[in-house]
């Protein structure tokens, strides 16, 4: 403490405050505390509204993307083919939901996911082929057979997982 007092003396700062300083300080403090606005500024409302709107848009975008049904590949074909594709896709989604409910460990699910990924890649190639040759019955049959192969693969995966669960 003595060191601090010595430094204050060297700086020529008076140890005592001028008369009335404390009262002036407290009155300024009180006036500033009581002079603040009663309502927040309008830009704060705009910022909150923009944030809420952004969150709503993100939720709509995210959930519409994840909850949307799979895209139809054979949309330009006749109604029976489209209905068949929709049925096969719904069967695939049901099996994927069952597999997801089984809660398999990531190290065990790696090979299964690779098999499913390969089938999806084959479907993508067939989709590209169909865009180049629309209406080719061989490609349509190959797409339907690939869906059936994917269902069979998912059935095998489910059986293996249920057997060892």
Image: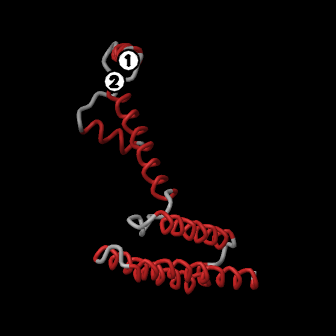
Q: Earlier in the sequence, mark 2 or mark 1?
A: 1
Q: Quadrant where the C terminus lies? A: bottom right
Distance CA(mark 2)–CA(mark 1): 12 Å
**What residue lies at 32% left-to-right and 41% top-to-bottom?**
6
Tell me the colour scheme of the image.
secondary structure
**What residue lies at 23% left-to-right and 37% top-to-bottom?**
11
What x and y, as percent, mark residue 141?
Answer: 46, 80
- Is residue 33 placed above or below 114 in the rendered structure? above
Of residues 112 and 69, the one nearer the viewer is 69
**The residue tagged with tag 2: helix, strand or loop?**
helix
Q: Which quadrant of the view contains residue 16? A: top left
Q: Which quadrant of the view contains residue 17? A: top left
Q: Tell me the tag on residue 121.
A: none
- Is residue 107 placed above or below 43 in the rendered structure? below
Crowd rating for badge 1 (residues with CA inside 10 Å; few <14, some 14–19, many 20+): few
**What residue lies at 49% left-to-right and 53% top-to-bottom?**
63
Q: Tell me the tag on residue 42.
A: 2
What x and y, as percent, mark residue 5?
Answer: 35, 38
Mark 2 or 1: the one toward you: 2
Q: Which quadrant of the view contains residue 138? A: bottom left
Q: Tell me the tag on residue 37.
A: 1
**The residue tagged with tag 1: helix, strand or loop?**
loop
Crowd rating for badge 2 (residues with CA inside 10 Å; few <14, some 14–19, many 20+): few
Q: Quadrant where the N terminus lies? A: top left
Of residues 83 and 97, the one nearer the viewer is 83
Could you tell me how many numbered marks the image carries? 2
**What residue lies at 31% left-to-right and 73% top-to-bottom?**
131
Of residues 25 and 108, the one nearer the viewer is 108
- Is residue 41 placed above or below 134 in the rendered structure? above
Evaluate if marks 2 and 1 touch, with contact meaning CB atoms under 8 Å apart: no
What x and y, as percent, mark residue 2?
Answer: 39, 42
What x and y, as percent, mark residue 84?
Answer: 54, 69
């Amino acid at each position: 403490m003595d060191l601090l007092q010595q430094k204050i003396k060297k700086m020529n700062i008076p140890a005592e405050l001028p008369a009335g300083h404390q009262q002036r300080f407290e009155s300024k403090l009180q006036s500033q505390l009581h002079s603040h606005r009663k309502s927040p500024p309008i830009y704060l409302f705009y910022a909150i509204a923009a944030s809420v709107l952004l969150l709503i848009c993100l939720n709509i975008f995210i959930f519409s993307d994840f909850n949307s049904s799979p895209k139809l590949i054979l949309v330009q074909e006749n109604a029976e083919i489209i209905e068949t594709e929709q049925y096969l896709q719904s069967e695939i989604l049901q099996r994927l939901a069952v597999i997801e409910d089984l809660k398999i460990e990531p190290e065990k699910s790696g090979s299964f996911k690779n098999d499913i990924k390969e089938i999806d890649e084959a479907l993508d190639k067939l989709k590209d082929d169909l865009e180049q040759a629309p209406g080719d019955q061989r490609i349509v049959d190959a797409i339907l057979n690939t869906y059936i192969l994917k269902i069979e693969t998912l059935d095998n995966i489910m059986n293996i997982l249920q057997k060892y669960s």
